[in-house]
Image: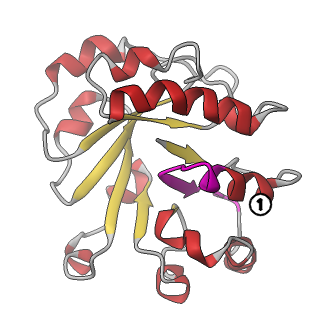
Amino acid sequence: MIVLSNPTAIANEINVIHSLLEEGLQLFHIRKPEYSLKEMISFIAQINPEFRPRLVLHSHHELIETFKINRIHFTEETRRRITLEKYKNKEIHLSTSTHSITDFNSLAPEFEYAFLSPVYPSISKADYFPKTDLFESIKDRTNTKTKLIALGGINAENIETPLTNGFDNVALLGTIWNTENPIKNFKSCQRIALSYLQ
């Protein structure tokens, strides 16, 4: 299972991140689109170094060498502007975001996994909801090299549906950060997901 950071700073954030990783979170995406390089350095430096193999950088990709992080994520916009050649021999795991199965199917095989969103109305973004039924559209999936990750509005009540309808894994955001009980919510989702992801 994957968790994305809250896009803006929130209270007790680093402690929550440590708790999630200690509870067995597979990958933690650091998505802070407004953070400067200095703010990003400060943020990553607070995370226990033992967890760095499970961190994924969405921005300031140049910091992977400083912090010995080997995972980077490209937004849809940045993916269209980059060439993948420079990453081919660096043992860097690549991921990206997509919003249609057509986009997902056209991804280069270098991408280990990709988000497809939103599968449900977003918990963290107002007025962000599916424009098409993604559960119906993924029946047209042809890309089998890249893992397909459901994102958007996922919680313990609905997590089973993507895992039994063609998605390879799920990513959580709002159900972790828009709540008073992030660890409890994570563990509820994790318990259900593990029965499908074994």
Locate residue 2, reporting x and y percent.
49, 45
The residue under the point 31% across, 17% down is 164
Residues shaded magenta: 20-34
The answer to which of 75 and 77 lies nearer the viewer is 75
Disc 1 packing (10 Å; few <14; some 14–19; many ≥20):
some
The answer to whether residue 117 is visible is no
Between residues 89 and 21, which one lies in front from this camera angle?
21
Instruction: Give the camera-side residue of 114 and 189.
Output: 189
With respect to residue 64, does 112 lie above or below?
above
Displayed quadrant of residue 108: bottom left
Reply above or below: 94 against 101.
Answer: below
Badge 1 amino acid: Ile
Q: Quadrant of the C terminus?
A: top left
Residue at (43% x, 59% y) in the render: 73
Q: Which colour scheme is used?
A: secondary structure
Residue 35 in sight here:
yes
- Element at label 1: helix
Which residue is the site of mark 1? 14
